[in-house]
């Protein structure tokens, strides 16, 4: 995933923060003293609580006892609680698929972020049967519970505004995000949904009430464009649909080069409208 629109998005962040773009390092410390490749910058500024803004490994359990592993990117320079973005990967991906987008959201693609503007707090995790998490990847109903528990946990992490969380999911993560967007979740970006959790997408959108949804798919991607359009019929809040040409699926849509808007830019524009960055 090359995240087309990276340069434009960084330019937007530079205007907002008055800073220059920075390179990205592979090695970062994590909770528990181990290390992992997360795509974070070095020398992250501390948060208001004094904790490092470096990515942190988080271990937790789903309700059935399945061991799950995630990565938490605190918002740098945050002087107050900030909006959070919870990232749900596709099948057969892992949380690491989101690394580049995560540091963009966190603001660490910018060197020396302005103390006047905070990025988002970001959390990504491995669904059961994927990455470092335990359990079976065939347990689709379990994915929904994993997403529920991750959302509940994210709301309790340091510096996160528990009432301003957006979920961004791809493929089965796109469905799970809509399925569980309950208390604390204000909206969802759904990339290539398709009723993969066994819950009808339109019904799940209806159950979200007046919460915002951005549904994105490619015209040739099996049932995903239909799911996006069906969801619009059940929506009670702000519901936007973006259908690209071709057959790119989920994370592959970040690499679409022949159409505007670039997906990364579109996501940031949507976030700025529904969960604006916090000014300290």
Image (cartoon, rainbow, N blue to C red):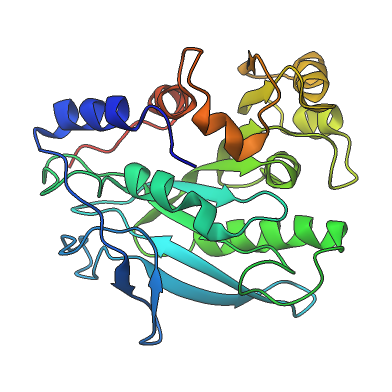
Q: Position of residue 1 (x, y in %)?
A: 50, 42
Name which quarter of the figure residue 185 lies in: top right
Instruction: Residue at 31%, 29% (x, y): give it.
Output: 9
For residue 116, which quarter of the picture? top left
Q: Is residue 166 left or right of residue 126?
A: left
Q: Camera-side residue: 82 or 217?
A: 217
- Examine the rendering and report whether any part of residue 188 can be seen: no
Q: Which residue is drawn at 77% across and 26% down?
A: 221
> Where's residue 91, x and y in %?
72, 52
Q: How far from the left and from the top, in percent, is residue 135?
A: 78, 75
Q: How many labels does the image show?
A: 0
Relative to 6, does residue 103 appear above or below in the rendering?
Answer: below
Residue 46 appears in which quarter of the rendering? bottom left
Does 271 sit left or right of 236 as displayed? Answer: left
Q: Is residue 58 in sight in this rendering?
A: yes
Give the camera-side residue of 2 and 201.
Answer: 2
Tell me: residue 89, above or below residue 193: below
Q: Is residue 183 left or right of residue 260?
A: right
Quadrant occupied by the C terminus: top left
Percent across and percent down for residue 271 are 43, 29
Residue at horizontal 82 percent and vertical 32 percent from the top: 201
């Amino acid at each position: 995933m090359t995240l087309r629109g990276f340069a434009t998005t960084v330019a937007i962040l530079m205007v907002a923060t008055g800073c220059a773009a920075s390179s990205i390092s592979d090695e970062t410390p994590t909770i528990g003293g181990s290390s992992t490749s997360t795509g974070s910058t070095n020398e992250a500024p501390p948060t208001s609580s004094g904790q490092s803004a470096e990515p942190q490994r988080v271990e937790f359990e789903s309700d059935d006892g399945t061991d799950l592993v995630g990565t938490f990117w605190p918002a740098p320079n945050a002087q107050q609680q900030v909006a959070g973005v919870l990232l749900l990967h596709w099948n057969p991906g892992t949380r690491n698929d989101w690394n580049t987008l995560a540091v963009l959201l966190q603001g660490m693609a910018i060197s020396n972020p302005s103390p006047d503007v905070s990025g988002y707090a970001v959390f990504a995790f491995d669904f059961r049967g994927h990455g470092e998490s335990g359990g079976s990847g065939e347990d689709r109903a379990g994915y929904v519970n994993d997403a529920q528990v991750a959302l509940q946990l994210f709301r309790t992490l340091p510096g996160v505004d528990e009432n301003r969380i957006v979920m961004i999911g791809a493929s089965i993560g796109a469905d799970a995000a809509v399925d569980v967007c309950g208390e604390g979740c204000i909206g969802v970006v759904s990339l290539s949904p398709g009723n993969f959790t066994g819950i009808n997408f339109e019904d799940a959108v209806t159950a979200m009430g007046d919460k915002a949804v951005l549904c994105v798919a490619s015209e040739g991607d099996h049932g995903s464009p239909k799911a996006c359009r069906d969801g619009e019929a059940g929506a009670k809040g702000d519901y936007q649909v973006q259908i690209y040409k071709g057959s790119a699926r989920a994370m592959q849509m970040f690499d679409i080069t022949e159409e505007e808007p670039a997906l990364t830019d579109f996501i940031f524009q949507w976030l700025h409208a529904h969960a604006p960055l916090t000014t300290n």
